[in-house]
Image (spheres, rainbow, N blue to C red):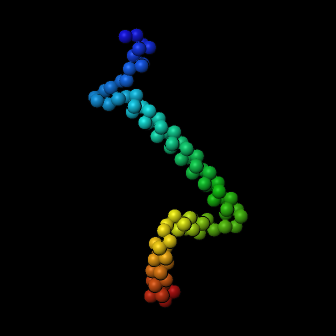
Amino acid sequence: MDNAAETNVTTEVGGIAGDRLRSIIERIERLEEERKSLGDDIKDIYAEAKSAGFDVKVLRQVIRIRKQEPADVEEQETLLDLYRRALGM
């Protein structure tokens, strides 16, 4: 086989298809880069919010709460209120 023919053949070592493995790894690497870029964008938005006078810790809590089911949020708030009253807060 010449070099051109060898590159078209899927390389298999120890039962592992090298081309398929390389493709999967490259896709993961691209997504990791995208995630890093998105993380940087989110960090910039939090900095913008902070400069506008918003409390970033509270913003993070609000975002966390918005991801939850309303019933779960209500249960947590009820328990928090109960615990606060039990502690005299």
x, y (%) of residue 85? 48, 88
In the displayed orientation, state which residue is furthest to the left.
Answer: 14
In the depicted view, which residue is nearer to us: 36 or 71?
A: 71
**What residue is rendered at 39% in x and 31% in y?**
20
In this rendering, the answer to whether 87 lies above or below 25 is: below
x then y, percent, for residue 71: 47, 73
In the figure, residue 61 lies in which quadrant?
bottom right
Residue 17 is situated, as x and y percent measured from the top left of the image, at 35, 29
> Is residue 34 at least partly visible in the picture?
yes
For the N terminus, the image quarter is: top left
The image quadrant of residue 49 is bottom right
Q: Residue at x 46, y 40 (%)?
A: 28
Which x, y percent locates residue 40? 60, 50
What residue lies at 31% left-to-right and 26% top-to-bottom?
13
- Side of 5 where 40 appears, left or right: right
User: How many numbered markers are drawn?
Assistant: 0
Considering depth in this image, is 43 or 17 the residue closer to the camera? 17
17 with respect to 69 (left or right): left
Residue farthest toward the right in the current orientation of the protein: 52
Can residue 87 be seen here?
no
